[in-house]
Image: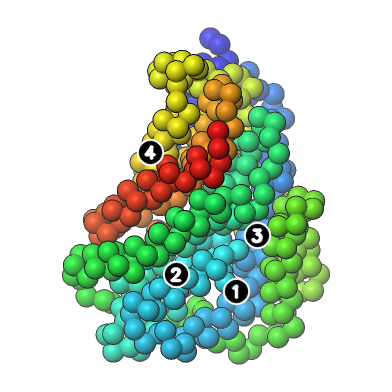
Amino acid sequence: MEHSTIAIIIILLAMVSFALERIPLVATALLASLAMVLFGVMPVEEAYSGFGTNVVMMVAGMMIIGNALFETGVAAKFGDAILHTRFAKSEKSFMVMLMVVESTVLLFINNSAIVALMIPIIAAVASRSNGKITLKNVLMPVAFVAVIRGGITMSGSTPQVIGQTALTQIGLPQMGYFKLAWVGIPRTVMCIIYFATIGYALEKKVFKFDDKIDQKLLTPSTAGGGGFSKAKMWISSLVMAGSVIGFVSGTFSLGFWSLLGVTVLIATKCVTPKQAFGSVDWNTIGILGAAQGFATGLNVSGGGKVIAETMINTFGGVKAASPLLITTLFIIITAVLTNILSDTALAAIMCPIAANVAVSLGVSPYAMVIGVILATGGDFTPIATAGLTQSLVGGYRFMDYVKVLVPLWVLLVITTVIFSPIAYPF
């Protein structure tokens, strides 16, 4: 059997396993990568080479730097400031303020960390508002926008760094830190407008359950900044700012700046080595590293090229196939699948295929790959994206998400289809 066929079969089996989740996602990713080796698709060195890449270093480093803001009290002090703002008097203005803050001031923090910060803030304000502000009406919009605004920068979530790998594997340079912003910003702005208007009205109609606030939600980041070292607060804040400046500067690699920031935090005792390693989501790192392995197998075996050629021939061959139509198809397929598949796992499967299709068509792959990256965010179920899953503490049922988020999901797909080819011409 041809290596390309074996690689495609392994990817299809991995996709089924990702969807069923009978075993952990990281186990599926590792098995898929190792299967490529066992069946002779690629050498064993390639199976784990992804764990030492710039991408993995950047993601792990930013997890530690982001968590340092919690460990040193920066997040607590920021949360306390929000609690006492005048915007916390009205439910809609409070909701909009939080969405704007997480999309600007907190833009460089991972989406899961943002939601973890916002939950106790919203719960605290709701508990002392005498019913004027409710957790159920504020939390879902804030969590959803936290996921979407992650698509503005390279450090906002994991799918973009997987897409980065897919592009470098076909010989393209790394994307700039704000490369995704041309589409990510319009998507984020549209979400904020939606929740301030149509979405908020839908919430009022759909959320008929009582607003119950678990007292455990009131403690993590609403205790104020007391007891924290001001020096460590300043250092952790400057490390975050310095890392972002390094990312934007384009000097050295993203991984270099992340690890430099982590080194400073540990050297100054802002975090201990144990805290640093404990703040890394090793499940995400495992999927990310292994996914680069089986993506390499798909490429070196020619499997990606076979899929690309099959897809192009379905639309009439290289001369007749429309890059815009295929990009649209990629975005829609990804946007549908992201409701049942992990965004990280889905990006690992779809990005290399999109890159290969673009190469076969002889067009720039950025519109297709970035379209796929962004389409992995914006699901209308709480299943596949950690940031949205965290919002389940608001007491929502599965259909609550569907009823409120499906209209926005449609708008996001349309926005991505329109802006991707404009921002990244073929």
- Which of the two discs, 2 and 1, labels the residue nearer the N terminus? 1
Quarter residue 235 falls in:
bottom right
Instruction: Determine the residue positioned at 38% across, 46% down.
Output: 413
User: Disc 2 to disc 1, how far (Cα)?
Assistant: 20 Å
Q: Nearer the viewer, residue 266 or 254?
A: 254
User: Disc 4 to disc 3, how far (Cα)?
Assistant: 30 Å
- Which of the two discs, 4 and 2, labels the residue nearer the N terminus? 2
Q: Secondary structure at mark 1?
A: helix
> Hey, what amino acid is under mark 3?
Met
User: Disc 2 to disc 3, how far (Cα)?
Assistant: 21 Å
Q: Position of residue 363 (x, y in %)?
A: 57, 28
Picture colour scheme: rainbow
User: Disc 4 to disc 1, how far (Cα)?
Assistant: 37 Å
In the rendered image, the vertical position of residue 289 relative to residue 362, given as above or below = below
Query: In this figure, which residue is indicated by the disc labeled 4?
Result: 332
- Which of the two discs, 4 and 1, labels the residue nearer the N terminus? 1
Q: Nearer the viewer, residue 166 or 49?
A: 166
Marks 4 and 1 close (CB-CB < 8 Å): no
- Which of the two discs, 4 and 3, labels the residue nearer the N terminus? 3
Q: Viewer-nearest of labels 4 and 3? A: 4
Instruction: Determine the residue positioned at 58% across, 77% down.
Output: 75
Marks 4 and 2 close (CB-CB < 8 Å): no
User: Disc 4 to disc 2, how far (Cα)?
Assistant: 26 Å
Q: Position of residue 331 (x, y in %)?
A: 42, 39
Quarter residue 67 falls in:
bottom right
Instruction: Determine the residue positioned at 41% across, 48% down.
Output: 415
Query: In this figure, which residue is indicated by the disc labeled 1?
Result: 70
Q: Position of residue 320 (x, y in %)?
A: 44, 18
